[in-house]
Structures are given as C-alpha cells and as structure tokens.
Image: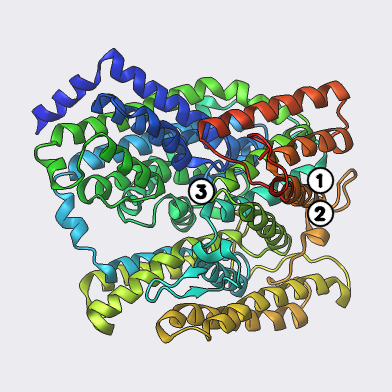
Amino acid sequence: MADTLLAALSALMTFEHLLYMLVGVSVGLVIGVIPGLGGIAGLSLLMPFLYGMDEISALAMLIGLVAVIPTSDTFSSVLMGIPGSSASQATVLDGFPLARQGQAARALSAAFISSMFGGLFGAIVLTGFVVIARPLILMFGSAELFMLALFGLSMVAVLAGRSLPKGLAACAVGLLLGSIGGAPATGEFRMTFGLGYLYDGIPLVVVGLGLFAIPEISDLLRKNAAISDRPALGAGWIMGLRDWYRNIWLSIRCSGMGCMIGAIPGLGGSVVDWIAYGHAVQTCKNPETFGKGDPRGVVAPESANNAMQGGALLPTMLFGIPGSGSMAVFLGGMVLLGIEPGPAMVTTNLDVTYSVIWSLALANVMGAGICLMLALPISKLTQIRFPLLAPFMIALICFAAFQATRDIGDLMALISLGVLGILMKRFAWPRPAMLIGYVLAPQAETYLYQALQFYDWGFVTRPGVIIIGLLALASVLFGLRKRVDDTGHVVAASDDVAEHEGGWATRLPQIAFGILMLGLLGLGLHDALGQSQLALVFPASVAVVGLAMGLWLLPELIGGHRGHVAHYDSERDGAHVGQSGIGGLWDGALWIGGLVVVSALIGFYLAMIGFFLAFLRLRARATWLQTALMTAAAAAFILLIAKMLALNFPSGVLQSYLDLPWPFR
C-alpha cells in the first residue's frame, strides 16, 4: 500500500498535473469569495473541460476546486459578515466581530491555518480509512442515520439563545420548511399551496442567504459607513497562528467531527460548522467571549468544514453515494472520466484513490497560501463606504439565489425569507436553530420511515442507536447549561436582560411576531392533517411540538417581568439605539424587494442595471461617472459568470411579449 501511495504522489508531481490543480484552486478561490455560489456551481463550470483530459489531471483540477472553497469563503464571512457558503455561516459569529475590532488579520490567519489543518486531517483520515471504511460505513443503517440526524438537531439546545421555547419553535419552523414538497414515504406534495415553485422544496442556498445575508446587508446599510473604521487588516497574523496552536486539540476534535459528518450522506457542510461551533461552546473554558470576537469561534468551524471534504469522499468513491451536493457533481465527473466508483477504488483503482488523496492535501496547502497573499487587497473592501459596496453584494446574492433552480421564484423566496430573517434577528429568534431544522428535516423524515419499515419500533434497541442517542442526550444537557444567542454570545438559561423602559405598547411587536410564528406552525399542521397517515406523521408531530413551544412563549411575552429572557427588541434594546445617522430597519429590504419586483416585470438583467443606476445615485450619492463605471463593471461581471455557467437570467412579463436577445430574454 505504501508503494502505491508514493507512486500516486510521483505521478501527480508533474508540471502538467500541478498546473491543472492550480487552475482548479484558482476557480475555487473565485467561487468561494462570491457569496452563495459554492462547490456545485464551480464544479459544474469545469465539467465541459473534462472530455479528453488525462484522468489524474482532471481529478486534480476537480479536487483543487472542492478543497479550497471552504477556505476562500472565509473572506466574505470575516470581512463583511455575509456567509460565503453554507459551510461558513458559523464563522461569521466571531470572525466578523474580530474584523470590526481591527483584527481581521488575526481572524483570517486563524481561519486559513485551521482550514489547511482540517483539509490535511481529512486527507490523512481518508488515507487511513479508505481500505477499512467500507464495512464501517455499512454498519450505519437507516436507524443509525436517523439518530445521527437527531444528534444534529440536539445542537439546537446550544443554539437556542436565552429563550429555550424561541429556539425550539424556530427549529420546528425550520423542520416544516424542510418538509415542503414531496413526502419521502408517499410522494404526496405538502405545503405547496398550488405554487409550482414549491413542489421541489426551497433550495438551501436561498434559505441560507435569506436568513443570514439579507439581514446583515440591511444592518450594514443602516449605518451608512464602512464595515470597519480601523486599518483593513490590522496586526495579528502571528497571533492568529498562535490562537490556532493554543487550541490545537479543539481543531483536532472539530476536524474529526467534520470527517465523520462528511462521511454520512445527506448531512454534509450545511450543518457541520454549527455542530463544531456548538461543540466549542460546550467544551471550552470561559465561553462568555464567544460571539464577541473569540478566535476559538473561528478555529472550530473552519477546521470542521475543510475536514468534511475528506469524509465526504469516502462514500462517494467507495459506494457511489455522494456525501454532499458538490460530491454529487464530482461523482458525475468521475463517470465522465470513465472511473467507476465502488469496491474497485480500493483494489484495482487504488492508485487513482491515492491520487485524489494527494490532490486534496496539496490543494489545501496551495489554497491557504494563495488566500494569505490575497488577504491584503481583498481586505481593502472593508474600508469602502458600504452603500457603494451594497449593490454589488445584493446583485451577487440574487445571482447566487436564482442559480439554484433558475426561476424567478428563487428571488421571491429570497426576499420573503430575508424579511423573516430580519424580524428573527430583531426579536432574537435564533436563525441557526431554524437552519439546522431545515437542513436535517429531509434526512430525519426519510430515515425514520425507513427504520420503521425495516425494524418497526424495535430499532430503538439497536446498539448503534442507543450509543448515538446517549451522545445526543449528553449534547442536550450540555447545551441547556451553555447556550448561544443569535449573535453567538453565550448566555445562561436564567440570564435576565436589561430591557428598555416602556409600557404594554412596547411589547406588541414581539407579541405580534410570536403570533406570526404560531400562525406558520398552525398552517403546517393544517396542511399535514389533509395528508395520508404516512405523510402527516412527521410534519404534524413537528408542528404540534412547535405550537406547544409557542404557547409556552406567548404568556412570557405578554406577562413576563421587565427584563425577562424572552423579551428582546433590537429597535429598543440594540446597541445602535440613540446613535446618530442610523437608517431605517427596512431600508435594505425595500431596495432588494424593489429589485425582485422589477425583475418579475422586465427580467433580472435589465432590472439589475436599473437597480445599480438608481441605488448608486439615490442611496449611495455617487457621481454620474462613478455610477456609470460601477454599473458597467457589474453588468459585465455578471454577464461573464452567466456565460461561463450557461445560465439564462430569470425572465419577466416583458419577455413574454418581446423576443429579446440574450441576456435580456
């Protein structure tokens, strides 16, 4: 085996193979920096170039792209507070506060070294387990996979914030959101309300950007200033390295968790960063600094999301079962190259497997090095007045959203979830808990039905189920002692907050939003009761639990004493209250909503050009020359990406009457 491992390295270390790997790494860096695109879009971009390529060069290029996206997506998470991908959402909680304190260099260096270590750890695990992993993975049946989904849901106890009923109710709404579309057991369509767009459910990228990116853009727009008023990077490159070294055991643990979660098909990168972050809060000393710029809040998720790629490659190569969405596209690339995934990957094609492993390790080192070199120029963006940056970020987020299904419904769902995210942030309803519920809903429901079909309720006595159940119970107990709120701050379950002075009327917005969330849960229950028994069990159970939590919460909102943990309204209690120059809460959402509405009328590309002209002149107060140059640059950039991805922009009413050329049709 050692001879094969060294021979694979020797075959890879040629100029041609390394050049193709560099191409993949470079494309991955660009894709990662643009919020919301992710590995699926990047791999799809490279697919047409695989025909006729040498298989080692092609695999090196694909792995180069996959390996570095979790590294380069750190830029937007740390510097702008906007998740670069679904795997870097937890990094925002501590990385962005560090950047605003003038310690972006410290956050980025800790993130890059953690990402590189996680990637190398994943490659080592892949090397050691590739031969013995097949029987280990086969030990996980549907019952154990259901319990792993429950283990992921147990992290809601950590991410529930000050108010446990708010956290559980938010998770229940997320589980219902993830249940939209066809029921796994019967194929019946649930909660579609006659809208064709909802028949396949709402894409993850739309949910993630709506809940996290739009509220952050709205907040930054209100301040009418640069993201940071301190030097772009500040000092701290060496300090970030020391932060990682001081927390190396945390990095090792989170890397191990990343590998394990990556190896379980369906869990993937959408929750691994939150699970790692929750683990860090549970196990680290002095957790009260989390959410305020604690480097450990960067080290944990960045170690896990890069290590996940090594774990995700195990089921992809050994079973032909993709461990994540990007691995599904990678699997298609293997088939295009004539490589058949399966047992042959550890026998006759072992050299190809080790080439993939070496590519993973080298690409992580290469990607971290390039990111360090690019950090200074990219960080200059934080010194630009945000209203000048906002239209570019909004256009990229909308572009990333509609590439999910290439339907105008993506943009409608994006702004709807963005409004929900803004309100959840205002009233301290934990968005991470909702996201975890959304991501794990399909897996939890599917594996529960399969477990009941194969084992009936006797599955709860299986040894693996009992072990994972005990781990989930321990996670819940730890989480009830240490919880983090919507911004990552650690809070005790009994902590009271200093609430604003005011009477009954000041509570009405909180109560109204609580009733709105109850209405969503009630709507889910009403729809579930109209389904067959197999299709209604999961959503009805979730809705009942969520309604119980909501009914627990409402009396606290109505009658709780001033300062009660359930009470929070950022418009009265937030740090910005009383500061001069703060804009309205809905300023950013109204601009984005305007772009979506006009897109439905005249198509996205024409609407985007008009949006840039209007926003830069009216909101950013740019000169006509600045407006023209920035609009032309944005239009050309979006056009270039769309051309490379063979993407048609969402059309509007205008296109149904006029036969316009691309990109206006």
Q: Residue at x 42, y 27 (%)?
A: 25
Name the side, left or right, on which 41 lies relative to 637: left
Mark nearer the N terminus (1 vs 2) = 1
Image quadrant assignment for residue 116: top left
- Relative to 656, 326 lies left or right: left
Q: Which mark is residue 585?
A: 2
Quarter of the image holding residue 367?
A: top left
Q: Which residue is mark 3?
A: 86
The color scheme shown is rainbow
The answer to whether residue 584 is above or below residue 183 is: above
Contact check, label 1 and label 2, Cβ < 8 Å: yes
The secondary structure type at the circle numbered 1 is: helix
Quadrant of the drawing holding the N terminus? top left
Residue 159 is situated, as x and y percent measured from the top left of the image, at 54, 62
Residue at the spot of label 1: 222
At horizontal 30% and vertical 15% (from top left) the residue drawn is 16
Whether residue 228 is situated above or below residue 153 in the rendered picture: above
Residue at 31% across / 32% down in the picture?
Answer: 360
**Circle 1 Cα neighbour tier, 10 Å, few/some/many (<14 / 14–19 / ≥20):** some
Which image quarter: residue 450? Answer: bottom left
Helix, strand or loop for disc 2: loop
Gap in Å between the C-alphas at discs 3 and 2? 25 Å
> Type of residue at label 3?
Ser
How far apart, in angstroms, are the residues tagged by discs 1 and 3?
25 Å
Q: How many marks?
A: 3
Q: Amino acid at mark 2?
A: Leu
- N-terminal of the pair, mark 3 or mark 2, is 3
Q: Disc 1 and disc 2: Cα gap in Å?
A: 7 Å
Q: Position of residue 108 (x, y in %)?
A: 54, 32
